[in-house]
Image: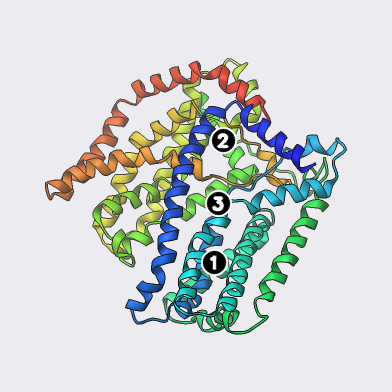
Amino acid sequence: MIKKFIFLEWKAFIRSASFSKNLAMKILLGFLMIYFSLIFIAMGVGAFYILKKMNLEPLQTVNRFLIYYFIFDLIARLMLQSIPVLNIKPLLVLPFKKPTIVHFSLGKTVLSFFNWLHALFFIPFSVVLIIEGYDVVSILFWNLAIISFIYINNFLNIILNNIDKLFAVFLVVATALGTAQYYKLFDITVFTAPFFQGLYEITGLSLIPIFVLAGLYLFTFRFFKNNLYLDAGLSVKEDIATTENLSWLNQFGTVGTFLKNDIKLIKRNKRSKTTIFMSFLFLFYGLLFYSGGIESYDKPVMHLLAGIFVSGGFLFVFGQFVPSWDSSYYQLMMTQNIPYRGYIMAKWWLIVIATVVSTILASFYLYFGWQIYLTIVVAAIYNIGVNSHLVLLGGAFTKTPIDLSSAGGAFGDKKAFNVSAMLLTLPKMLLPLLLYGVGLYFNNKVLGLSLVAGTGVLGLIFKDKVFSLIEKRYKIEKYSTISAYKQKS
């Protein structure tokens, strides 16, 4: 039966309308996986000797910070790791046992890159420990416990992506612990370090994470199995019905009509609401760069990069999925007498408004100096004048539909963005950094910022010509996009 599922997954991949795009992206991701694998191996081998040179006991030091390692791993999974899914509903009307479907879907996560990547650090590190005289059996049990924690994070990621309350609780707790540690109010490592060290020193203690992992898998299995029905997620909570006319947008004509549709879409669907939450988180991305806590980030070029993300969170999270947000009714829209220019313009104005609002909200960065906030404002101008056009142009080639109703299902994909989508943002980063670099080359930051802002202003001046090119590309890709959106996987 598992063999049949693998066969169906392979057919779904090669028959997809976006096969060529997915294949190219997977090849690129493959090179990145090799790159990060080599980095983790090097870190695993070198960690022991680096810590020794710092007059630190290697194993105890690693055990002290393992709690933050696992917290960061879980956050990275929640942000980036896609949950492997099956097209469940067609299988439920066929003679497939529900436990088999669930076991296969959960089993796919075991092979995730986010799981075995950690082994490339811990296994070389453990080998070095053994070579340096540490007890072999104790190291093996310590490794077994660490692997159990890695897979505990794997299944926590699945659960937290399907139970919103748990995700909120985890986010609050993680933020509170990090803040308390930063301001030296409470050091959680005082309590966690002895436990992780005990996994090496105390026989049998490593069984605890193994039992926790087994119980978590059983809980996850039962959760999905109990929600594995054709009508799962279709029932809605009864509430007082409300209507929103947003009639004040009528004065903007066709653009206003599309804006009303987008605003309602964002407010009524869980996945689109997630984009607002993620955009809000992007506002605090600059703290990594502007606070001076990380020396390698405290550089002018990195400050501009942070400004692009701080002001353009909505642009990258929501904009990169235009027109996929409308994929469920895109065919109907194309049968109407709808001008593409109005449709695209509405998306552009939504991105512009969100960018302006983000820039205003980011005014708290004035605490780090007016130069920092000026960099954010310049980045916002570039986002509005250039990156907004690039995002909309890229939307013409977007062939992956978004099922807004899938968020309520057991195996629904709730990710507002994924690794592939983030990789597509790289070209939008290079040009402003290059322009800013020209100014830095002449030791003139003002020149660099002027070049970036000037490019954004030029984008606004030639907006109509750019929109004509974008509109033309949308018309060329119209029927292939409709064909792709008809597919369910």
Element class at badge 1: helix
Query: Residue 92, how many percent across, how many down?
Result: 83, 39
In the image, what residue occupies the spot 57% across and 29% down? 19
In terms of sequence position, does the residue under pointer 1 or pointer 3 come before the other?
A: 1
Q: Horizontally, is 144 left or right of 438 in the view?
A: right
Report which residue position mark 2 lands on: 262
Tag nearer the camera, 1 or 3: 3
In terms of sequence position, does the residue under pointer 2 or pointer 1 come before the other?
A: 1
In the image, what residue occupies the spot 44% across and 53% down? 36
Element class at badge 3: helix
Query: Residue 261, how many percent across, how many down?
Result: 59, 33
Tag nearer the camera, 2 or 1: 1
Q: Residue 339 versus residue 405: which sits nearer the camera?
A: 405
Q: What residue type is labelled 1?
A: Phe
Q: Is residue 426 above or below residue 150?
A: above
Report which residue position mark 1 lands on: 70
In terms of sequence position, does the residue under pointer 2 or pointer 3 come before the other?
A: 3
Cβ–Cβ under 8 Å for marks 2 and 3:
no
Disc number placed over residue 462 in the picture, else none: none
Residue 489 seen from this side: no
Element class at badge 2: helix
Q: Which amino acid does label 2 sit on?
A: Asp
Query: Residue 28, how many percent across, how many down?
Result: 45, 39
Q: How far apart in space, not on screen, are marks 2 and 1 (Cα)?
A: 38 Å
Q: Horizontally, is 444 left or right of 138 in the view?
A: left
Label tally: 3
Report which residue position mark 3 lands on: 113
Residue sticking out furthest to the right: 95
Q: What residue type is labelled 3?
A: Phe
Residue 120 seen from this side: yes
Q: Residue 319 versus residue 207: which sits nearer the camera?
A: 207
